[in-house]
Image (cartoon, rainbow, N blue to C red):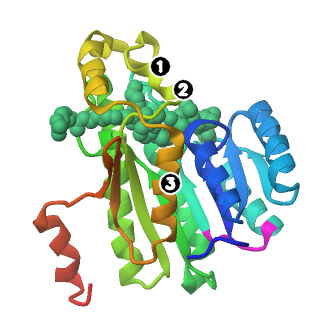
Amino acid sequence: MALHGKVALVTGAVQGLGKGFSEILLQKGAKVALLDINESGGKDLKAAFDKEYGPDRTLFLTCTVESEEQLKDAFQKTVETFGGLDIVCNNAGIIDETNWEKCVSINLNGVVRGTYLALKHMKKENRGQGGVIINVASMAGLGPLLTAPIYTATKHGVVGFSRAMADVSRLCDYGVRINVLCPAFVQTAILSSLGSEGTTGQFAGLRGVAEKLLEQFGVLEVSEVAKNFLKLVTDESRNGEALLVQKEGASYVTFPQVASQLPSILAPSL
Ligand SMILES: NC(=O)C1=CN([C@@H]2O[C@H](COP(=O)(O)OP(=O)(O)OC[C@H]3O[C@@H](n4cnc5c(N)ncnc54)[C@H](O)[C@@H]3O)[C@@H](O)[C@H]2O)C=CC1
Ligand SMILES: CC/C=C\C[C@H](O)/C=C/C=C\C=C\C=C\C(=O)[C@@H](O)C/C=C\CCC(=O)O
């Protein structure tokens, strides 16, 4: 998929990975709607992007992925402003093991909301043009991060939901690819949550285990993850894939056979 002139929407776009994903899309010629709860940060980022890429290339929209109404309005505004929608990245996420319902609401429910809205605008049966959805999980969507069991559960949920929806999309011919990105540790603000009591609550005492994992896996730069994000966006042969990104490289995850065969039981052509 060539990105010049394509329209993208990224949640949690103001800093960290979301900013990196937005910038690489801009570099490749796409227009990007930047969604985030951080209004002042969003205005500053848009001003910086305006200077670098021109004022018509981005749109900043204050929006929490916890609100169906705000997210729906943001999708609508994006389509009205840029004339379509081709790429959606459901990236917003937090670690909060104390207020864990909020963690589920943002990390899992927010991804479900964003995916359904993306499909509403992009799927062919609604006269959409097709496109691609990238949901951001984590390596903690494939194995446990002990200081953050709820975070781990939400990210496993994002992996399962994205794979199931990718098969739905293929079976129902939506024309939309859905893939999931699973980075190991990345140098962003969320890393300070590793053993902080505020975010890991009753599990903060296990910070030593998380620090060992960090030592073992190292810390990725945002740019390394963004390059792999771009691969998932542009490689039209990939649907329903989970891309694990680690320091030593990126690899597509192989899941247990029984799960991968279910769709072919339902539809032998898959
Ligand atoms: N940094 C890391 O080590 C890794 C991060 N991830 C995932 O990557 C995604 C991005 O995280 P980072 O960039 O690291 O974190 P970050 O904390 O630097 O950025 C998160 C962004 O999301 C925004 N945000 C938070 N709640 C929101 C909401 N309710 N609605 C809209 N926007 C909201 C924040 O304002 C911020 O701009 C998350 O889903 C995270 O779980 C995955 C693997 C590794
Ligand atoms: C504060 C946390 C910062 C960011 C969260 C982000 O989502 C990063 C998560 C990164 C790591 C996830 C860890 C997952 C661990 C596992 O899968 C463990 O079961 C693996 C343990 C040992 C692996 C041994 C090996 O395969 O080499």
Q: Nearer the viewer, mark 3 or mark 1?
A: 3
Q: How crowded is mark 3: few (under 14 residues within 10 Å), some or many (20 or more)?
A: few
Q: Quadrant of ligand 2?
A: top left
Does the numbered disc 3 mark a residue whose Cβ is under 8 Å from ligand 1?
no
Question: Is 72 or 217 nearer to us in this picture?
Answer: 217
Secondary structure of the magenta portion, mostly?
loop
Residue under label 2, please give it: 189
Gap in angstroms between the C-alphas marked 3 and 1: 24 Å
Which amino acid does the dot numbered 2 rest on?
Ala
Q: Residues within 10 Å of mark 2 (few under 14, many from 20)?
A: few
Q: Which of marks 3 and 2 is in front?
A: 3
Does the numbered disc 1 mark a residue whose Cβ is under 8 Å from ligand 2?
yes
- 219 versus 241 height, above or below: above
Q: Please state, as top left, top right, bottom left or bottom right, where the C terminus lies in the image.
A: bottom left
Q: x%, y% of residue 170?
A: 38, 80
- Identified at 52% across, 40% down, the residue is 222
Q: Do the residues labelled 2 and 1 touch (CB within 8 Å)?
A: yes
Q: x%, y% of residue 5?
A: 73, 72
Q: Please state, as top left, top right, bottom left or bottom right, where the N terminus lies in the image.
A: bottom right
Classify mark 3: helix, strand or loop.
Answer: helix
Question: Is 185 or 116 nearer to us in this picture?
Answer: 185
Please report the bounds of the magenta region as a residue range: 82-86
Asked whether residue 244 appears in the rendered view, the answer is yes
Q: In this view, does 119 lie to the left or right of 168?
A: right
Residue under label 3, please give it: 227
In terms of sequence position, does the residue under pointer 3 or pointer 2 come before the other? 2
Does the numbered disc 2 mark a residue whose Cβ is under 8 Å from ligand 1?
yes
Residue under label 1, please give it: 192
Gap in angstroms between the C-alphas marked 3 and 2: 20 Å
Q: How crowded is mark 1: few (under 14 residues within 10 Å), some or many (20 or more)?
A: few
